[in-house]
Image (tube, rainbow, N blue to C red):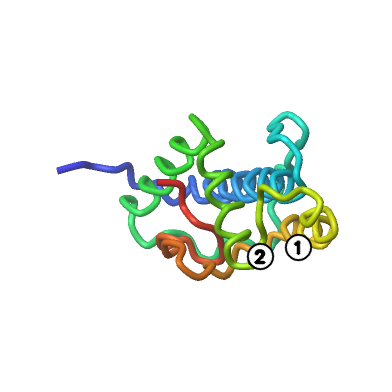
Amino acid sequence: TTKFKSNWRDHWRDLRQCEWMHDQILASGAAQLLAGQDLDLNAFIPSTAPPADYGGPCPATPFDMNRRFLAMARFNADPEPAIRAHAKRIAQRERIDLDSPLRLATRATLFVRALLDWRVFRDCPPGAPPPGGRPGGGAVAT
């Protein structure tokens, strides 16, 4: 059996911050791709302080918290596939051809505004995997 320290809940603030930054990076990267740009992870600096209403309650068990921290580590190791998959899901849902920059350019500004609003992550897009138990936001990178 795995034993966790009794103060495991003290790490909730750090998990919220990691997930907030993850959602911002995911949104920024998807916005770049939907705008017909190359993905540049250095072009965006996420804010580190999540809004007060972001993230939901603390995970119920230390195993849930650990699973979510591991998902953040997997995402941080190689974020590009998750960002491209997210942009592809949005494009499919909105019936956008990612290979047609001229058609895409007319709608890019709206998507950039929508994607940079973290509330977009509250709803799981059709056909996407469920958020993986992340109350209040985002799909967990798998």
Horizontal side of 132 relative to 114 (left or right) equals left
Helix, strand or loop status at disc 2 = helix
Horizontal side of 21 relative to 136 (left or right) equals right
Horizontal side of 77 relative to 24 (left or right) equals left
Dot placed on the residue nearer the N-terminal end, 1 or 2: 1
Q: What residue type is labelled 2?
A: Val
Instruction: Report crowding for label 2: few under 14, some 14 to 19, many 20 or more residues within 10 A (C-alpha).
Output: some
**Residue at (37%, 62%) from the top-left corner?**
60
Instruction: Report crowding for label 1: few under 14, some 14 to 19, many 20 or more residues within 10 A (C-alpha).
Output: some
Q: Please, which residue is most extreme toward the left here?
A: 1
Q: In which quarter of the image is residue 3?
A: top left
**Residue at (42%, 48%) from the top-left corner?**
68
**Residue at (76%, 39%) from the top-left corner?**
37
Mark 2 — residue?
120
Position of the N terminus, as image quadrant, is top left
Q: How many labels does the image show?
A: 2
Location of residue 103 in the rendering, given as x and y in whole percent from the top left corner: 78, 57
Q: Which amino acid does label 1 sit on?
A: Ala
Mark drawn on residue 104:
none
Location of residue 107 in the rendering, given as x and y in whole percent from the top left corner: 81, 61
Q: Are the two marked residues, 1 and 2, in contact with CB atoms closer than 8 angstroms?
A: yes
Q: Quadrant of residue 21?
A: top right
Could you say which is closer to the camera, residue 89 or residue 1?
A: 89
Mark drawn on residue 114:
1
Q: In which quarter of the image is residue 80?
A: top right
Q: Measure the alpha-carbon separation of dots 1 and 2.
A: 7 Å
**Residue at (72%, 50%) from the top-left corner?**
100
Helix, strand or loop status at disc 1 = helix
Location of residue 52 in the rendering, given as x and y in whole percent from the top left corner: 69, 62
